[in-house]
Amino acid sequence: FLLLVGNIAPEYENFLLEKLNDSLIPYRIQPHCDTYELVNMFCASDIAVYPVQATISTIEASACSLPVICTSEIPERYKSGNGFGIEPGNLEQLSSALEKLINNDFLRKEMGMKGRLYVEQHLSWKIISDKFLRF
């Protein structure tokens, strides 16, 4: 099942819907939602994918133990071994990363736990506020 969360660029929407309908993969498109709803979406997911844009949601997904696939332009979001970076718009890299995660439960769970650990040790509000106060 494919869950797409967020707004879809108008120039891409028809193309995406056509591909989804041709694939016969069951899907749901959830427009932009607030943080509390997003946590529920993450809890219902196995992988978080951000192939073009960098959002704070990559960190939130990692905090929820999801492996992430995101643009290689933000290596700090996957450098702890919690996911893959892909060149924006590179469907071959996206497909390869998805295939690795879909076909390997251990890798998916391991990357998810690495992401959660990274967020807990480096990006929690406690850690950030302590660094700010020391500064």
Image: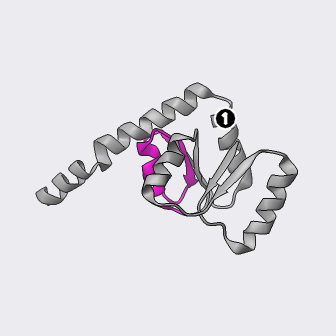
Q: Taking the image as drawn, is residue 79 in sight? A: no
Q: Which amino acid does label 1 sit on?
A: Ile
Q: Give the range drawn in magenta.
A: 53-82
Q: Is mark 1 on a helix, strand or loop?
A: helix
Q: Which of 27 and 92 is in front in this view?
A: 27
Q: Nearer the viewer, residue 7 or 118?
A: 7
Q: Where is residue 7 in the image (x, y as percent from the top left)?
A: 61, 66
Residue of label 1:
102
| Magenta stretch: includes residue 121 | no
Q: Residue at x 79, y 60 (%)?
A: 17
Q: Which residue lies furthest to the top in this view?
A: 106
Q: Where is residue 29 in the image (x, y as percent from the top left)?
A: 67, 57
Question: Considering the image in quadrants, where does the C terminus appear?
Answer: bottom left
Q: Residue at x 40, y 39 (%)?
A: 116
Describe residue 11's horizontal placement relative to residue 7 as left or right. Answer: right
Whether residue 103 is situated above or below residue 54 in the rendered picture? above
Whether residue 24 is situated above or below residue 10 in the rendered picture? above
Q: Taking the image as drawn, is residue 68 in sight? A: yes
Whether residue 17 is situated above or below residue 81 in the rendered picture? below
Crowding near the residue tagged with mark 1, few <14, some 14–19, many ≥20 C-alpha atoms within 10 Å: few
Q: Residue furthest right?
A: 22
Q: Which residue lies furthest to the left in this view?
A: 134
Describe residue 67's horizontal placement relative to residue 23 as left or right. Answer: left
